[in-house]
Structure formats: C-alpha cells, structure tokens
C-alpha cells in the first residue's frame, strides 16, 4: 500500500536524479509516468508533476517547456503502446 509520504519520497528521488543525470532521470520519469498512466492515475497530475520536476532542474523557461512537453508526450506514447499490447 502506497502512502502520500512514500510517493513524496519517490518523487524527491526522481527530482534529485534529474538534477544530476538529466537523460537517465528523463528516462526514469517516462517509465514511471507511463506505468502510472496505465494504472489509471489522472493524466493532469502526471503533467503537473512533469512541469514541476523540470522547472526545478532547468531554469530556462523555453527549455523547461520543451523538455517537459517531449518527456510527457513520450510517456503517454509508451503508455498507449503498452496498453495496446496488453489488451
């Protein structure tokens, strides 16, 4: 059973990984977001989390918007493909 404190700890781990290794953190965020989307988590929460995570690590608004959009798109694409393959 997941609790809010556990989810906050996991989010902080992903956030610290994004600060240190942008590529690995982005890949991890894509995988976690795709899995959460398959588990019927509201997509708005995932998008807000993505925006917050990238705004904390990237100070340029344009790069933040660009990378957050690409990562969210790839996460939803992966989620759709996995859902289709499981059906």
Image (cartoon, grey):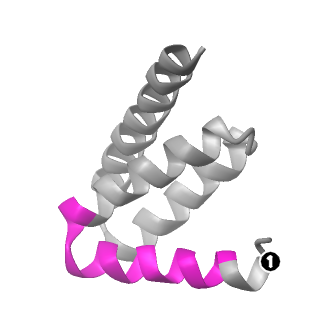
Residue at left offset 63%, top offset 36%: 38
- Residue 14 in picture, x, y percent from top left: 43, 73
The vertical placement of 86 against 42, above or below, is: above
Highlighted magenta segment, given as a residue range:
7-24
The vertical placement of 81 against 66, above or below, is: above
The vertical placement of 7 against 45, above or below, is: below
Element at badge 1? loop
Residue at left offset 34%, top offset 38%: 70
The verdict on residue 23 being magenta is yes
- Residue 31 in picture, x, y percent from top left: 42, 49
The verdict on residue 12 being magenta is yes
| Secondary structure mainly formed by the magenta segment | helix
Asked if residue 7 lies left or right of residue 64, the reply is right
Residue at left offset 47%, top offset 67%: 53
Asked if residue 81 lies left or right of residue 86, the reply is left
**In the foreground, 48 or 46:** 46
């Amino acid at each position: 059973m997941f609790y809010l404190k556990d989810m906050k700890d996991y989010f902080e781990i992903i956030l610290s990984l994004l600060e240190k290794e942008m590529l690995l953190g982005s890949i991890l965020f894509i995988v976690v977001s795709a899995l959460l989307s398959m588990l019927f988590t509201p997509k708005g929460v995932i998008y807000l989390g993505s925006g917050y995570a990238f705004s904390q690590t990237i100070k340029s608004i344009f790069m933040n918007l660009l990378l957050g959009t690409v990562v969210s798109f790839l996460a939803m694409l992966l989620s759709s493909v996995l859902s289709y393959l499981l059906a």
